[in-house]
Image (spheres, rainbow, N blue to C red):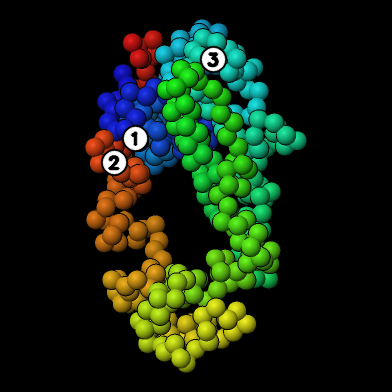
Amino acid sequence: MTQTKQGPLAGLKVIEFAGLGPAPHAAMLLADQGADVVSVQRPGVGVAGLTGKAQGVKRGRTIVEADLKNPDDIAKILDLIDRADVIVEGFRPGVMERLGLGPDVVLERNPRLVFARMTGWGQEGPFAQRAGHDMNYISLTGLLHAIGRKGERPVPPLNLVGDFAGGSMFLVFGVLAALYERNTSGKGQVIDVAMVDGASLIGQMQWDFRGQGIWSDERGVNTLDGGAPFYDTYECSDGKYISVGAIEPQFFAELLDKLGLRQEDLPYQLDQARWPELRAALEAAIKTKSRDEWAEVFFDSDACVAPILTFEEAPKHPHMAARNNLPQVGGVTAPAPAPRFSRTPAAAPQEPSVDVADADTLWR
């Protein structure tokens, strides 16, 4: 049986065709907020390792094993689809059609169905059938070129921008938008979610700055890419680091005050020609204390300074702990559901169901 659900999406029925990366992450976000998510997985894969360290992204799901090349299993999944609100799939274009589960088939059976398709390159275009990963998708958007130090090669921002910011977040946004529209039309639709599209939109501010002539294609010389000394990371006396984001003049003034520096002794904050001089002064001051000493100095400050924590340290920070931002799920640390709702709060995240459910018993 499916797990008892709580949250603003309670009652929403979602079928996830299990894969990697942003599609399961999006399904996790929907499940976190109360959606009843059934994850369809290959036989022998659904049960193996469901509990433990590798399965956090599958939390909150009920697992159904199905051989999608077996007509009997396909028939059971189609019966489940007849009762679903949403499908989430992350295969290459054409795979669902070859399985007999494409939009034309399932929307004819269930016209209210929202069919969300997650790919890197999109359902059409010269690269649609190409393999790729996060950094490949953001390479075409201009964003990867912009990330890194001056005179050095671009730095992959983990797999956060393509897979999750441009991928799973836009899939969830698309699903919720389509469900809202369905309230008026009574009809579902297909959503083409491409990481390359979402990542481009994530970069809207940089495109705006570029249009205003205040963003250079040269890496590491701009305000938000580490080029500005008041928006960068700094090493402390113990070899650990703090982040400094004192962009606004009042925050910059407070930064200098907390560091024991006088504004009149330093270059004007926005005098880009003298940024190396300003950076040197900040570096020297910050090197006089450890990271945790600076964290204490700036704890109640608006100077926009924060300690740079490791994954091990993050759950123990007073603010993170007060919000229970990184609780234990299945014995391992995992992020809490977000955002938080006042009237329909999400339940604490649960491990995926370890009892493999039969599709015939679901959603009756």
* Residue marked by disc 1: 33
Quarter of the picture holding the N terminus: top left
Q: Residues within 10 Å of mark 3 (few under 14, many from 20)?
A: many
Mark 1: secondary structure:
loop
Image spot of residue 71 (x, y percent) = 55, 8
Residue in the picture at 35% in, 44% down: 339
Whether residue 230 can be seen here? yes
1 or 3: tag closer to the N-terminus: 1
Comparing marks 1 and 3, which lies closer to the viewer?
3
Amino acid under label 2? Answer: Phe
Q: Give the residue type that dot 1 points to.
A: Gln
Res 107 label: 3
Instruction: Determine whether label 2 and label 1 are within 8 Å by CB.
Output: yes
- Separation of marks 1 and 3 at Cα, in angstroms: 25 Å
Specify which label sits upstream in the sequence, 2 or 1: 1
Locate residue 147: give its quadrant: bottom right
Please, what secondary structure does the residue beneath circle 3 have?
A: helix
Q: Residues within 10 Å of mark 2 (few under 14, many from 20)?
A: few
Residue 341 has which mark? 2
Give the amino acid type for the residue marked by disc 3 in the picture: Leu
